Amino acid sequence: MNNRLYLLLIGFSLFVMSCSKKIVAPTLSLGPPKPALTVEEIDFEYMHGKARMVLREANKEREVKANIRLRKDSVIWMTFSVIGVQGGKALINKDSITIVSNVDKEYFVFDYAELSKIYNFDINYQVIQSAMLGNLILPRKEEDQVVLESSFYIMKQQADSIIVDNYINAASMKLEKLEMKEKNSNNSLVINYSNFQPIGSKLFPYNGTISLFYKTLGGSLNTTIIFEYNRAEVGDKELKFPFNIPKKYVRR
């Protein structure tokens, strides 16, 4: 797999992975008595961390190290390196996603309208940020269905042809699994979050697995992206987000 495709898949993982105000759900009827479901979500001004990412597709596997910085509701900044050599970087803001490949000396710019049309799902900055943090990617609605099964609340949501099942741990009230399916194509996404550790006053998933199942002209594909944080911190101290594209790089 070439570096360009790898960076594109990482970019894809960012917007399907990845924090808004804490959401307090209305009381939902699960039969008497009526419990209240409050989903515990990460809140912060700035966040930074280091993570290992592994991409698996067919019989191929590739690993990178990532430095990640976020400013709440504003920007996500990442750099990628392989064996100490910087291979690329990404900048995600409210207007677009820019991915740069230092190896191929080229870059890509995606706007959200384009991405939403390609994947038939309303993609925006908030979706990316929420998914990266293990927060809900769709806002709560009164018509969302909630059932309690064993140790999990399962919250079922729908947006046009997209169906989302959220598995929320009944003890921690953290989102531990998300299943998303597009009814017309049967393309699907599954995210599993684990290894929750305190970050600030909340729990943050240090580990996660993203599984993509999608159809192309060449047939069905299955891509898995694994991320493992070894450090994550939040605070009010302002972070910098340096990002430039050399003039000699070609836009694709």
Image (cartoon, grey):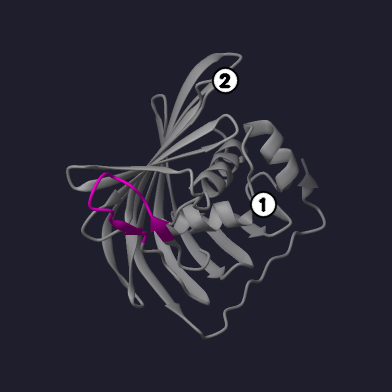
Please identify the residue farthest to the right as the structure is shown.
247
Residue at x-position 64% and y-position 58%: 92
Please identify the residue farthest to the front as the structure is shown.
32
Residue 89: give x, y in percent of width and height. 60, 56
Residue 137: give x, y in percent of width and height. 50, 50
Residue at x-position 62% and y-position 56%: 125
Taking the image as shown, residue 250 lies to the left or right of residue 174, namely: right
Q: What amino acid is at disc 1? A: Val
Query: In the figure, residue 150 lies in which quadrant?
Result: top left
Over which residues does the magenta segment extend? 25-39
Q: Is residue 53 magenta?
A: no
57 to 63, vertically: above or below: above
Q: Residues within 10 Å of mark 2 (few under 14, many from 20)?
A: few
Out of 59 and 165, give the one closest to the viewer: 165
Q: What amino acid is at disc 2? A: Asn
- Which element is circle 1 on? strand
Out of 31 and 151, give the one closest to the viewer: 31
Residue 144: give x, y in percent of width and height. 45, 44
Taking the image as shown, residue 59 lies to the left or right of residue 171, namely: right
154 to 136, vertically: above or below: above
Q: Is residue 34 magenta?
A: yes
For the C terminus, the image quarter is top right
Q: Residues within 10 Å of mark 1 (few under 14, many from 20)?
A: many
Residue hosting label 2? 184
Residue at x-position 48% and y-position 43%: 143
The kind of secondary structure the magenta stretch mainly shows is loop
* Residue 71 in view here: yes
- Which element is circle 2 on? loop
* Badge nearest the viewer, 1 or 2: 2
Residue hosting label 1? 100
Q: CA distance from mark 1 to mark 2?
A: 32 Å
Q: Earlier in the sequence, mark 1 or mark 2?
A: 1
